[in-house]
Image (cartoon, rainbow, N blue to C red):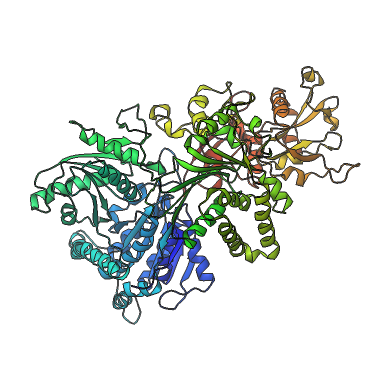
């Protein structure tokens, strides 16, 4: 075995690392969450990095996933070693070519980040519904359960496909494995070369189509012979399992890591076992180990090679003592007799016992259940719940775990407080804003700890599917032993809140352990912050006997020329107070990481980041927590009392971060949701908002036109309507001759603005007394929030201008129409949404929109709230997502 080298990377990079080095042609097309595999391959190719044969793989982005599969088929038929990467609907578009490739016994590996197939709704997150749709293609299906396995099995599948001629689909769970960052052992080029048999590569090349050896492949056949010809492949599939196990054995010789097609872990005399595949295996292993230590006779059987399904090896892996089995599927097949793995296991048990395979002689009690759809959390508590269900005299079959099913009542209960987290593991949570650098900084932290200490490290990052500007939660673990906890941190020693507004919206301290540390980015210093915290937060800090630190990260960023980027500052705080590494050593490593990360951007950028590190240490303050609460600041309601019932009871729970607790019965069975709901989700993510200067304004309407989120609006109205206006409400005389005698107002929605500044950039008016000012200027949001909330409500109640009096060919005048697309989840400064907004102003009250999947469908139809809305008469766009190539 070669000398071991450890690195920290995510599952996508781990799989791509092997795929790139063991192939020659890579056809790609991006789809979340598999896109980074193609991006890595493209980057390596452009950097002239060679594969193990000394050539640079050719990487080509095609027009679609169907095109990528077609290019794959073509490259393989000419004798090249070829691969591609995909997920979800992208994989479905490859299925026709997969049947052809498998039917022609053509060796290759497709690497898939298993992702939910859109049904009643689209989801970018992970489960096995896409992979299960390929079961009949003839591809072998090999499942990885961790980042290390994603790298290892990428290589094993490459060896196995060349020897067996069966094409392989190597898959791992989207996001949970594809985006988890972990410390793993890197496979050396020496190991890669020894695993790939060049004789088998030569055989693959000899089967290539060539004018030097002309053949015809892919005929059209008739009923007299098609059946017979199709059955010729049977010996190849019969041999595939043995070949794959031999590949695992060869891998063990080279690396010392041992794998089996079906791998059992648990008590040798287990009476209850769970069978599953994918990332849930490691979580189940952790739960089983914990339960064994409490004297329970339990185990877990991990499925590695799902197709071809080796009945004999499956039976041989089951302990003789087993009385009850639960088969868990991470997919749903509506209307079936059971989910795929469950059905296969039932069949394997029936045939295996009849054939005398393995140690069990009688059919055990077998139940099946679904878990983890669309990356739904799957925790040791849920696994314990399944084991407890198996104890019952009549356990529930076809159950669900992890949700509350109050429609068919098929969900099983579990203890939400059950935890197997080790006290020897440091666990940290970081609440950041999308694109503020929090995730990138935490990935650097993992590298610093994972690659500079003997500690293992794990990072997982929770995003919703909105664009930049939404919350991100980083879950980090560090410990002396390998970390197998493929679930979110629920009991954290350290919690950091990188955006002050989050303290109002989320109950983040519920996850802080007693004596844990809380770090808050806030404009208030150590002597002022306590009285400016909500009383509920103060009480939690007191009750948990927490340590409390504050820093004004934005002030430090401004002082050191970092703009709005606070990632380096907050990362420095973590290392300074967490004790994961000695303080001086940690700071030194951060500065090394800065030079490595930002070196290509120039010395000035590097120096600014290093200055930010030094200033952070000077401005980080510990707060002495009083024994009692102080003041009368309370957390605001997540949703206004004026909101409709569905918004309060369902969408409000999702906004508050409690979507996991919403029961099945709260949702429409066909995926229908009300429109006009984004007005109730007050995100408050802007640090600064635009303020209108009515004296300078020329009433051109450009600020309203370019506003990506429809938060700047203008109205022309009768002066009498100002009778009950708030004291701070602004108005002036309308300058357009057609509006003579009317009042004019530009108003900003303070809690919906993203602070992009597009309005200021476009404003042509200049203040004559101060040339640095325009008719729209950015000012701090917090001092203005309450007064502008009142002004906004008053503004909305002013009647809209009669559209019949507007010139349809003047865009400025159309800004007097109410936009029927407002407050979307698009990125701050988005260039698309102003056009969508104008479309809604012109035609929204009579529009039906079919939206192909992409940015527009995500910011236009993503829960918890949607931006399409209605006018005063209740009319507005009806909207539907129509997937990819429809």
Q: Choose top left, top right, bottom left or bottom right for residue 873.
A: top right
Q: Choose top left, top right, bottom left or bottom right for residue 221.
A: bottom left
Q: How many marks?
A: 0
Residue 548 image position (x, y, % from top left)? 58, 39
Task: Give me the residue at 8% from left, 52% from top.
Answer: 356
Task: Give me the residue at 32% from left, 72% from top.
Answer: 195
* Residue 319 in view of the camera: yes
Residue 869 image position (x, y, % from top left)? 59, 31
Task: In this rendered view, identify the residue nearer to me: 721 or 308.
Answer: 308
Residue 26, above or below 886: below
Residue 454 image position (x, y, % from top left)? 44, 60
Question: Could you tell me which quadrant the N terminus lies in?
Answer: bottom left
Q: Is residue 481 left or right of residue 535?
A: left
Q: Is residue 169 left or right of residue 467?
A: left
Task: Give me the residue at 31% from left, 28% from top.
Answer: 408
Q: Is residue 625 left or right of residue 359?
A: right
Q: Choose top left, top right, bottom left or bottom right for residue 308.
A: bottom left
Task: In this rendered view, identify the residue nearer to me: 229 or 428.
Answer: 428
* Residue 218 in view of the camera: no
Residue placed furthest toward the bottom: 212
Residue 717 image position (x, y, % from top left)? 78, 24
Q: Is residue 278 left or right of residue 462?
A: left
Residue placed furthest toward the right: 769
């Amino acid at each position: 075995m070669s000398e071991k080298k450890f690195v920290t990377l995510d599952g996508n990079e781990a799989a791509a690392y092997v795929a790139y080095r063991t192939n020659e042609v890579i056809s790609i097309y991006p789809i979340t969450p598999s896109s980074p595999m193609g991006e890595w391959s493209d980057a390596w190719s452009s950097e002239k990095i060679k594969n193990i044969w000394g050539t640079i793989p050719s990487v080509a982005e095609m027009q679609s996933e169907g095109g990528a599969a077609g290019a794959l088929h073509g490259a393989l038929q000419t004798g090249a070693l070829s691969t591609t990467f995909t997920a979800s609907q992208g994989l479905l578009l490859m299925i026709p070519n997969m049947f052809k490739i498998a039917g022609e016994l053509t060796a290759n590996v497709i690497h898939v980040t298993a992702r939910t197939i859109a049904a009643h709704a689209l989801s970018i997150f992970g489960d096995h519904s896409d992979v299960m749709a390929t079961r009949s293609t003839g591809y072998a299906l090999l499942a990885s359960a961790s980042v290390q396995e994603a790298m290892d099995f990428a290589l094993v599948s490459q060896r196995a496909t060349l020897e067996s001629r069966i094409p392989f689909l190597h898959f791992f769970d989207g996001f949970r494995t594809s985006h988890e960052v972990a410390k793993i052992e890197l496979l050396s080029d020496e190991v890669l070369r020894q695993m790939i048999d060049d004789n088998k590569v030569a055989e693959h090349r000899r089967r290539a189509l060539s004018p030097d050896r002309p053949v015809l492949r892919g005929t059209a056949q008739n009923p007299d012979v098609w059946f017979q010809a199709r059955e010729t492949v049977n010996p190849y599939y019969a041999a595939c399992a043995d070949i794959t196990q031999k590949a695992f054995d060869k891998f063990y010789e080279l690396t010392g890591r041992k794998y089996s097609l079906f791998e059992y872990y648990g008590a040798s005399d287990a009476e209850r076992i769970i069978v599953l595949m994918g990332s849930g295996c490691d979580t189940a292993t952790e739960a089983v180990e914990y339960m064994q230590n409490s004297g329970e006779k339990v185990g877990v059987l991990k499925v590695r090679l799902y197709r071809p399904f080796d009945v004999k090896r499956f039976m041989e892996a089951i302990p003789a003592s087993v009385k009850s089995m639960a088969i868990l599927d991470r997919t749903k097949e509506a209307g079936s007799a059971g989910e795929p793995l469950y059905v296969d296991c039932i069949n394997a048990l029936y045939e295996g016992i009849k054939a005398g395979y393995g140690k069990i002689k009688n059919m055990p009690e077998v139940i099946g259940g679904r878990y983890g759809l669309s990356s739904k959390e799957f925790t040791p508590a849920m696994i314990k719940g399944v084991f407890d269900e198996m104890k019952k005299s009549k356990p529930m079959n076809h159950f669900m775990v992890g949700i509350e099913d109050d429609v068919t009542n098929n969900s099983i209960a579990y203890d939400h407080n059950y935890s197997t987290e080790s006290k020897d593991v440091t666990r940290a949570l970081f609440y950041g804003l999308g694109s503020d650098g929090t995730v990138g900084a935490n990935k650097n932290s993992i590298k610093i700890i994972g690659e500079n200490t003997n500690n293992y490290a794990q990072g997982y990052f929770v995003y919703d599917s909105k664009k930049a500007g939404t919350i991100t939660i980083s879950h980090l673990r560090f410990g002396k032993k390998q970390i197998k906890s493929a679930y979110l941190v629920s009991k954290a020693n350290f919690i950091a809140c990188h955006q002050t507004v989050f303290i109002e919206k989320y109950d983040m301290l519920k996850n802080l352990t007693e004596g844990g540390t809380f770090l808050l980015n806030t404009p208030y210093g150590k002597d002022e912050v306590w009285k400016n915290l909500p009383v509920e937060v103060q009480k939690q800090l007191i009750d948990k006997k927490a340590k409390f630190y504050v820093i004004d990260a934005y002030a430090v960023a401004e002082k050191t020329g970092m703009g709005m980027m606070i990632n380096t500052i907050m990362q420095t705080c973590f290392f300074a107070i967490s004790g994961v590494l000695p303080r001086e050593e940690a700071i030194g490593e951060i500065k090394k990481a800065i030079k490595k990360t930002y070196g290509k951007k120039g010395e000035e950028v590097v120096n600014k980041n290093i200055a930010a590190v030094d200033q952070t240490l000077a401005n980080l303050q510990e707060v002495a927590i009083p024994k009692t609460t102080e003041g009368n600041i309370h957390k605001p309601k997540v949703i206004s009392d004026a909101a409709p019932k569905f918004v309060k009871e369902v969408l409000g729970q999702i906004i508050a971060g409690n979507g996991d607790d919403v029961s099945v019965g709260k949702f429409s069975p066909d995926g229908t949701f009300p429109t006009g709901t984004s007005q109730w989700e007050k995100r408050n993510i802007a640090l600064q908002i635009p303020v209108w200067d009515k004296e300078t304004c020329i009433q051109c309407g450009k600020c309203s036109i370019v506003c990506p989120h429809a938060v700047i609006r203008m109205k022309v109205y009768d002066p009498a309507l100002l009778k009950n206006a708030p004291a701070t409400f602004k108005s002036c005389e309308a300058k357009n001759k057609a509006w003579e005698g009317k009042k004019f107002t530009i108003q900003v929605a303070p809690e919906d603005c993203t602070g992009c500044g597009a309005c200021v950039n476009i404003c042509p008016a200049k203040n004559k007394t101060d040339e640095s000012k325009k008719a729209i200027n950015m000012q701090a949001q917090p001092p203005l929030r309450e007064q502008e909330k009142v002004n906004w409500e008053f503004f909305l109640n002013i009647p809209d201008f009669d559209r019949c009096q507007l010139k349809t060919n003047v865009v400025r005048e159309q800004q007097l129409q109410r936009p029927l697309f407002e407050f979307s989840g698009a990125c701050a400064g988005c260039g698309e949404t102003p056009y969508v907004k104008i479309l809604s102003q012109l035609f929204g009250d009579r529009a039906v929109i079919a939206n192909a999947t992409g940015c527009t469908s995500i910011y236009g139809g993503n829960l918890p709230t949607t931006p399409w809305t209605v006018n005063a008469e209740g009319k507005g766009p009806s909207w539907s997502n129509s997937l990819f190539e429809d």
